[in-house]
Image (cartoon, rainbow, N blue to C red):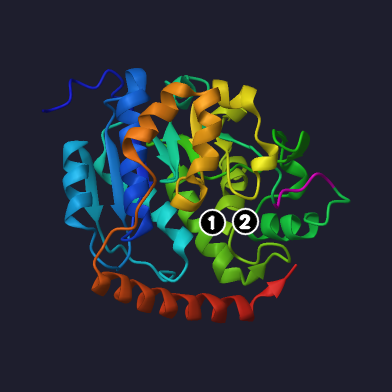
Amino acid sequence: MPLSPDPSPSLAFAMCVEAGGFESMAIRAAQSLRTFGGRFANCKIYAVTPRLGDPLSNKTLRAFDSLQVEYLNLRPPNRYSWYPLMNKPLTLLEVRKRTDARQIAFIDSDMIVIGEPNLLLLDDDTDFTACAPDKNIGSAGEEDPNTPFWKELCRELGVSFESLPWVHAHRDHIDIKLYFNSGLFTFRRSGPFADAYHQAVAKLLDSGLSSQVSNIYFHEQAAVGVVVVREKLRWKPLPHEYNYAVGRKIMDKYEPEKVRHAVILHYHDMMWPENWTNLMDRLKVDRPEIHDWLASLGPLKLTGSAVQKMTGKLIGHYRKRKFDRHKASCRVV
């Protein structure tokens, strides 16, 4: 049945999807918004494959149809098809061309909406919002070992490191120079963010800059806040409950009180069979309604035929060689 008229037409959701594990994750992200999104439950959702790869399974395409997810299988110009995180800025550019929504919220496919995400809708005084859930490769100031990398990154993007404002990294209880997690953010479609973000990620890759901690992997994430500053966007930080992370390596930092109030759960690897029970046992206590919903779906599963999986491995091997070749040519800071 068609969805009822969207009560919040000013906001559209965008996410990346590719054949394999991302398929079941993207379906689950869409299911969660439709189930728990409240007044945002009927917002337009776009799922984008912006580079060459195996086709999505028929099961995934049928699920997208039933959830009224618009799937875009595209081949925009991309010198960095070997860099998986370039999918994100490319997705934003393609969705911006097609949506009439005034604002676009990007959401990683390994996230689920578990409450009405009111703060994703920008008010009249805000152009951008995102969360800083942890420090990760961020800089806490001059003495931080990540600071030389950040200074060089800022120089490449035409911003002074000193001009970056401070933001609170929730899990680490520390203030850092503006560095958002790029798994969830909202921006204005009519503003400069999408183009500037794509150009910034490409420039960082062109520069040959590499971090001693994360090499080139987090360039697309580090660029977000710097672009916001450079484009003079008015920004507000999202609370931790809008990007609360769980994962096999960080379950010792699990905070029941925050999970009880979480709006968006960034589950990383916790819905695959090997970690499923650990997550579900905690949600049964802290978010029983989410536990019951997930229990009806079961853990994530890989999709695709044996031929598709073999093709995926070959493509992945080729891309990894290109990635490693670029990484080896970079200057490490």
Discs 1, 2 touching: Cβ within 8 Å: yes
Q: Main secondary structure of the magenta part?
A: loop
Residue placed most toward the observer, 32 or 119: 32
Residue 21 visible, this angle: yes
In magenta segment, residue 171: no
Total marks placed? 2
Q: Which stretch did the figure color magenta? A: 137-141
| Residue at 25% from the left image edge and 43% from the top image edge | 98
In screen coordinates, is 293 left or right of 154? left
In percent of width and height, residue 197 lies at 49, 50
Rate crowding at label 2 as few (under 14), some (14 to 19) or many (20 or more) other CA atoms within 10 Å: some
Outermost residue on the left side: it is: 1
Distance in Å between CA atoms under marks 1 and 2: 7 Å
In percent of width and height, residue 234 lies at 57, 30
Task: Please tell me whether residue 202 is drawn above or below residue 260 in the rendered image.
Answer: below
In screen coordinates, is 317 left or right of 165? left
Rate crowding at label 1 as few (under 14), some (14 to 19) or many (20 or more) other CA atoms within 10 Å: many
Q: Name the residue beneath numbered marker 1.
A: 200
Quadrant including the N terminus: top left
Task: Please tell me whether residue 134 is drawn above or below residue 329 in the rendered image.
Answer: above
Is label 2 in a helix, a strand or a loop?
loop
Per the rendering, the mark at residue 157 is 2
| Residue at 72% from the left image edge and 62% from the top image edge | 213
Is label 1 in a helix, a strand or a loop?
helix
Residue 178 visible, this angle: no
Name the amino acid, label 1: Ala
Name the amino acid, label 2: Leu
